[in-house]
Amino acid sequence: MIGIVHGVDLIEIKRFDQLNPAIRGRFLHRVFTLSELEECGESAPSLAGKFAAKEAAAKALGCGIGRVSWQELEILSNEQGKPSLLLHGNARTVAEKEGWISWSLSITHTSGLALASVTALIELT
């Protein structure tokens, strides 16, 4: 039998515009992979969207950030801009344990907010 899990997160984009310059670099490199940072550049909406996606994925996994690390949840986009969630390390292990068989990610922005939603199909035992 198949089930569904879902996670969603909403963040104010200005939080990335207002990051303290003294900690900005360290924070960005702790939360985002090099590939994610290359993809986003300095775009606050893109950074906020990826951040929200990581939070949404952790919620869908049922464990939050802590049991899985920020960089184990990687958000990259294809040539058309469609985002995808890549699971690494413990995030992949948790997903396998929870029975994830397929998942989907959606990210949207307004002028002030970024929202991400992760939905996964799970195999129920």
Image (cartoon, grey):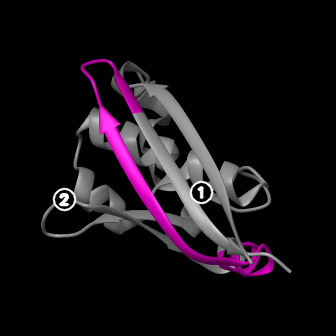
Q: Is residue 20 inside the magenta stretch? A: no
For this orientation, the residue located farthest to the front is 1
Q: Where residue 87 sits in the image (x, y, percent)?
A: 56, 74
* Residue type, label 2: Gly
Q: Residues within 10 Å of mark 2 (few under 14, many from 20)?
A: few
In this rendered view, identify the residue nearer to me: 121 or 23.
121
Q: Secondary structure at mark 2?
A: loop
Q: Quadrant of residue 34?
A: bottom left
Q: Quadrant of the N terminus?
A: bottom right
Task: Give the distance between the C-alpha atoms of the residues marked 1 and 2, in whole angstroms.
Answer: 21 Å
Q: Which mark is residue 88?
A: none
Q: For mark 1, what is the residue?
A: 70
Q: For mark 2, what is the residue?
A: 81
Q: Left or right of 6: which side holds 107?
A: left
Q: Where residue 83 sits in the image (x, y, percent)?
A: 32, 60
* Residue range highlighted in magenta: 92-114
Relative height, residue 90 to residue 68 (above, below): below
Q: Residues within 10 Å of mark 1 (few under 14, many from 20)?
A: many
Relative height, residue 27 to residue 91 (above, below): above
The residue drawn where x is 80% and y is 79% is 97
Q: Where residue 124 sits in the image (x, y, percent)?
A: 80, 75
Q: Quadrant of residue 72?
A: bottom right
In this rendered view, identify the residue nearer to me: 107 or 65.
107
The residue drawn where x is 27% and y is 24% is 110
The residue drawn where x is 72% and y is 81% is 96
